Image: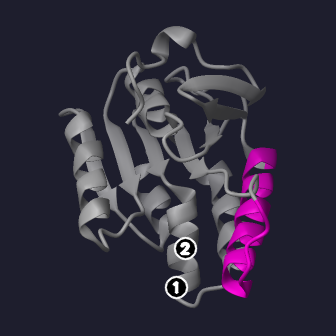
C-alpha cells in the first residue's frame, strides 16, 4: 500500500478518536461516502442489551445501499484481509469494543494489537478506524478497567504511529492531529448520533 493517498483519494489508514457521542462514527461514514464505490462497515459490537441493540439499529439505518455490514467482534485482522480490497473503503467501528471482545475472549490484547498494526501494509483499500478515547478521565478503581484503559491507550498510540491521518472529534467538530484533515465539505451536518 502506498503511504501517500490511495486511488480513492483517502489516506491508506485514518484513525478517528473521540468520546461517546462526539460525532466520530458519522464523520467516518461521511468520509467514506465522499468517495465513489462500495463501503464496507466492519462492526465489532455485540447487542448485549436493548439499548445497545437500538444503538446498532440507528447506525444501520443511517447507512445507505452502498454499505455492506460485516460483523466481526474478535478476528479483525481476518476481516480486513478479506474486505479491504481495491475499489472499496472500509470503516471499522469501533476499536474499543473490539478490544473489549478480545479481552473477554481471553486473547492477548497486546499481541492482537500488534497483529492489527502489522496487517496494515497488506491492505488494498483505505481503512478508517473509529475508537473511543477512554484515557482522559480518572484512573478506574478496579484492575480490569485499568487494564482496559492501558490496553486502549497502547493500541491508540501504536495505530496512530502507523496511521497516515489521525482526527480527534469533539462536539461534532474535527481536529487533525496527524496528516491532512479531510475536506471539511465531507463532514456531516446536523447533530451527531
Q: Nearer the viewer, residue 69 or 56?
A: 56
* Residue 62, horizontal then vertical, whole percent: 25, 35
Q: Nearer the viewer, residue 84 or 71?
A: 71
Quadrant housing the N terminus: top right
CB atoms of marks 2 and 1 within 8 Å? yes
Q: Which residue is mark 1?
A: 104
**Which residue is at a point 39% across and 64% down the rendered structure image?**
45
Give the magenta-colored segment's residue range.
138-161
Magenta region, main secondary structure: helix
Q: Nearer the viewer, residue 125 or 135?
A: 135
The Cα–Cα distance between marks 2 and 1, rounded to whole angstroms, is 6 Å
- The image quadrant of residue 189 is top left
Q: Please, is residue 115 above or below residue 105 in the view?
A: above
Dot 2 alpha-carbon crowd within 10 angstroms: few under 14, some 14 to 19, many 20 or more: some
- Can you see residue 123? no
Q: Which residue is mark 2?
A: 100
- Can you see residue 58? yes
Whether residue 159 appears in magenta in the rendering, the answer is: yes
Amino acid at each position: 500500500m502506498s503511504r501517500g493517498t490511495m486511488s480513492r483519494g483517502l489516506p491508506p489508514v485514518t484513525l478517528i478518536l473521540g468520546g461517546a457521542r462526539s460525532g466520530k462514527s458519522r464523520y467516518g461514514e461521511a468520509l467514506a461516502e465522499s468517495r465513489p464505490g462500495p463501503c464496507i462497515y466492519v462492526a465489532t459490537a455485540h447487542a448485549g442489551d436493548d439499548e445497545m441493540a437500538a444503538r446498532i439499529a440507528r447506525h444501520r439505518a443511517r447507512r445507505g445501499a452502498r454499505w455492506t455490514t460485516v460483523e466481526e467482534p474478535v478476528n479483525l485482522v481476518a476481516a480486513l484481509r478479506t474486505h479491504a480490497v481495491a475499489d472499496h473503503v472500509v470503516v471499522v467501528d469501533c476499536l474499543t469494543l473490539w478490544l473489549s471482545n478480545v479481552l473477554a475472549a481471553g486473547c492477548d490484547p497486546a499481541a492482537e494489537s500488534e497483529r492489527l498494526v502489522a496487517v496494515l501494509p497488506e491492505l488494498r483499500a483505505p481503512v478508517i478506524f473509529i475508537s473511543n478515547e477512554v484515557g482522559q478521565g480518572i484512573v478506574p478503581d478496579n484492575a480490569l478497567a485499568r487494564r482496559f484503559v492501558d490496553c486502549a491507550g497502547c493500541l491508540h498510540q501504536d495505530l496512530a504511529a502507523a496511521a497516515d491521518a489521525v482526527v480527534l472529534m469533539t462536539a461534532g467538530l474535527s481536529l487533525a492531529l496527524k496528516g491532512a484533515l479531510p475536506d471539511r465539505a465531507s463532514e456531516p451536518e446536523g447533530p451527531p448520533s
